[in-house]
């Protein structure tokens, strides 16, 4: 081997550089995690828990099932009742969102077509959640998160 011998100063600077990179990456990851955190589901978990069971039972009594699909630039949602026929909520609101960030959140406006609710829209590939909030004809609230995987 030729060149200068490794001294304590070289080892010190090398160690400092290695730890500097590790700390910089950790700080960057922590900042990204805080900036992209979508937030809380509810403001006060205790208050929300007081009516949870009654709301869950009322929603299950509706007997509704849902299916979500995305093809050819259309987001399609079907809600069926216990009898297998389409269920048409009196009110429906929906938000399409990425699971890890609020940056791409958008409200979805469905229109009835046949036995489905359809929303024409372009959706980027990846994982999405549709947060569905509906109200049945009898006033029963219905809430559900539907997972959607869009292939590239």
Image (cartoon, grey):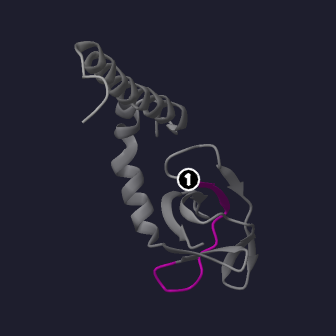
Q: Residue furthest top?
A: 9
**Left or right of 152, for residue 117:** right
In the image, residue 141 lies in the stretch drawn in magenta: no
Estimate the x, y position of residue 101 in percent, counting from the top left. Answer: 55, 44
Q: Nearer the viewer, residue 27 or 144?
A: 27
Above or below for 35 versus 111? above
Question: What residue is rendered at 64% in x and 72% in y?
Answer: 88
Estimate the x, y position of residue 11 in percent, counting from the top left. Answer: 26, 20
Question: What residue is rendered at 57% in x and 62% in y?
Answer: 138
Question: What residue is rendered at 63% in x and 66% in y?
Answer: 89
Q: Nearer the viewer, residue 65 or 96?
A: 96
Question: What residue is rendered at 25% in x and 22% in y?
Answer: 5
**Left or right of 56, for residue 62:** right
Q: Which image quadrant is residue 58 in?
A: bottom left
Q: Nearer the viewer, residue 152 or 111?
A: 152
Estimate the x, y position of residue 146 in percent, counting from the top left. Answer: 50, 64
Q: Nearer the viewer, residue 8 or 68?
A: 8
Above or below for 24 versus 121? above
Magenta range: 81-97
Give the SS element for disc 1: loop
Quadrant where the N terminus is found in the figure: top left
**Left or right of 97, for residue 43:** left
Estimate the x, y position of residue 35 in percent, counting from the top left. Answer: 54, 32
- Crowd tier of the residue under label 1, counting other residues whose Cα lies within 10 Å: few below 14, some 14–19, many 20 or above: some
The residue carrying mark 1 is: 98
Quadrant where the C terminus is found in the figure: bottom right
Above or below for 115 versus 79? below
């Amino acid at each position: 081997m030729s060149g200068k011998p490794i001294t304590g100063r070289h080892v010190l600077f090398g160690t400092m550089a290695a730890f500097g990179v590790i700390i910089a990456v950790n700080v960057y990851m922590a900042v990204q995690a805080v900036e992209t955190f979508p937030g809380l589901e509810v403001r006060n978990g205790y208050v929300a828990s007081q009516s949870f069971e009654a709301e869950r039972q009322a929603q299950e009594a509706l007997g509704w099932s849902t299916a979500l699909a995305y093809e050819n630039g259309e987001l399609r949602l079907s809600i069926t009742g216990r009898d297998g026929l389409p269920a048409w909520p009196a009110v429906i609101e929906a938000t399409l969102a990425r699971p890890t960030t609020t940056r791409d959140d958008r409200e979805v406006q469905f229109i009835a077509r046949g036995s489905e609710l359809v929303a024409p829209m372009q959706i980027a590939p990846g994982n999405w959640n549709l947060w569905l909030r509906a109200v049945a004809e009898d006033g029963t609230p219905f809430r559900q998160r539907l997972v959607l995987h869009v292939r590239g």
